[in-house]
Amino acid sequence: MNRRLRIPIRVKILVTLLFVVTAVVSVITFTMATMFHQDKKAYINDLASIAALSAAEEARTLLGGYTEGLRVHARIMQRPDLSPEDKTELLRGFFQDLRDLIGVRFYRDGELVASVYDDAVLVEAGVSREEVDAYRAANPLPMKRLEKGEIFVENSTLSRELPMLSLSFLQDVGERPVVVSALVRLDGLARLAARTALFRISLIDSKGSLLAHPDPEAIARREQMSLPPRLKIAAIQQNAGMTLEFEQDGVPSVGGFASVDIGGVVAAATVPASSAYLASHELLSDLMLVAFVLLLIAVLIGQFGSYRITRPVEKLSAATREIAKGQFAVQVDVASHDEIGTLASSFNQMASELEVRDEALEEAQAQLLQSEKMAAFGQLGAGIAHEVKNPLAGILGCAQLSVRKSEEGSALHTNLVLIEKETKRCQEIIENLLRFARQEKAVFESVQLNGVVDDAAAIIRHQLGVEGVELIIETADDLPMIKGNANQMQQVLMNLMMNAQQAMTGDPGTIMVSTRRCDDDHVEIAVSDTGPGISEESQRKIFEPFFTTKPGGRGTGLGLSVSFGIVKDHGGEISLQSTPGKRTTFTIRLPVEGKAPVLDSRPGSTASQRALRAAYDPSLLQRSR
């Protein structure tokens, strides 16, 4: 015997797990690269912080030297024992000692009291005193802040050849302090920007303008440096350094920031992130490439392996859904030689046996139903023929004789005519039942719906009145004829009206029956009531056989199901609109004579037969809708 190799499914799962491990290794590799990147990031942040702190310290020393020198000379200039000649000589020495000094302005009570400039420097740079005065008039000093003891520093450059800053502070001399505002060259601060090649060193004043920058043009234009909002923390904490990752002009950057602690000036050491993490990026790229290749291989092999495992299961799942629909002629083709292959073979055998048994069961059930139906209706027809039909014939004969002898137009004559008519109707019902037992179709002829409505109302109006229910009839005058069976349509209307009356459970109300022509091809009959309405759950099952909400012994649940079948036999539709607690309306839509579809004339196609069959197979009713 040729025995093929059988691979257990657990071995296949083990192989799949091996590829999962490969993916995990890739994740670990990526994690290691990320950790290296984090270490490099911490290193760069530390360097940026140190560079910013160093630049801030040097700027603090330089600006502090300017401030102290100005304070000393300002105090000397305020001495009352000095003559004007001595003060002039002191000013000349003042400009010689502070070689970066361009000019000094003195303010008392917010008003300019004196100003001194190095005219040679201004002329060489092409800047006049008037331009300096105009700039200060357009950009006044913050006197309130200065009077509180703050130092104000800003970029006041007016010419590319002469970058300068304004250094202003309050000099408390005697009873009337003065505000000293000096114009100082930016050359000393600008040299700080060239101290390192790795970081871009910048100094920013309190307005955000650059005081020092590798690009001299940026200082000359008094450009604003775009910095993150968190930078204001550095200006608050004295001698504090911090690092941030942010976007500068759309470029991801890393920056260290430190407060100079003079005039709100901030030192910044920034570097593009791409440059700072270049080495880690290269390592990360190599590791990611290796991990991607490993992951791709694992995915491809894992995909192939999982497909081989799950595809047979998917076939079995699809086959079970087909069997659930009653399609037993289904076979699963599985070529694997493991547990799934064995399961597929068992499934195919089961499907084959189910198909054979289902065919035998359907045939036996059909024969049983037909036998039971014919036996029941045969007995019923015989009983009706002997027990009801003959007495009805006597009643009909007596009624006809009495009609002839009664006075036409009298109440007695009207009642006798009604008895004659309803007796004939009873005979027709008996004949229809007999024809049903013999699998015959009802006879369709031209029918005037208004007459059907009037006949049904005449029979049931008295019973409705006893129950306190008012019956209102509204019929259209231009209603065309339909092709159908008047007796069956009358049965439908009486079913609907009786159901409406019973739904009111003895409470007074109104039932309205109306007819109208809705278009050239159809007419409508509407039966409305003021009863309690029908719940949404009941509406979904209202036309199903044996469904009833009446108490036990009060109904069989076949009335609406048979009515549904009768309307369908007439080529029409019946629909329900109901609002719980308010109103219920059944609408019957029928084609006019000559517009009705061809009816099914096969045995067992009548409404009563279909309703009875639907009682055993509710799917028939669903398909008919």
Image: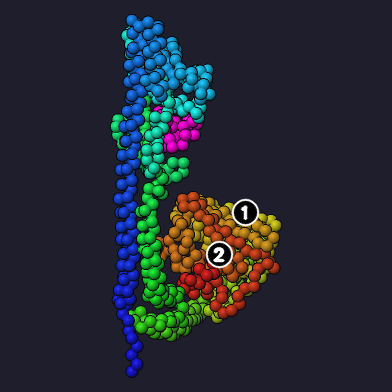
For the N terminus, the image quarter is bottom left
Which quadrant would residue 457 be assigned to in this image? bottom right
Coordinates of residue 89 in the picture (x, y in percent): 39, 11
Can you identify the residue that label 1 sits on? 474
Q: Residue at x 47, y 66 (%)?
A: 544
Up the image or down, 71 lies above or below 582; here it is: above
Q: Residue at x 46, y 63 (%)?
A: 541
Q: Residue at x 40, y 73 (%)?
A: 304
Of residues 242 and 307, the one drawn nearer to the viewer in this rendering: 242
Query: What whole-number distance in Å separates the C-alpha atoms at marks 1 and 2?
Result: 18 Å
Q: Is there any visible trace of residue 145 in the rendered image?
A: no
Can you identify the residue that label 2 sits on? 492
Which quadrant would residue 334 be assigned to in this image? bottom left
Q: Secondary structure at mark 2?
A: helix
**Disc ID at residue 76:** none
Of residues 500 and 569, the one drawn nearer to the viewer in this rendering: 569
Q: Specify the segment rendered in magenta.
A: 204-231
Q: Residue at x 51, y 52 (%)?
A: 583
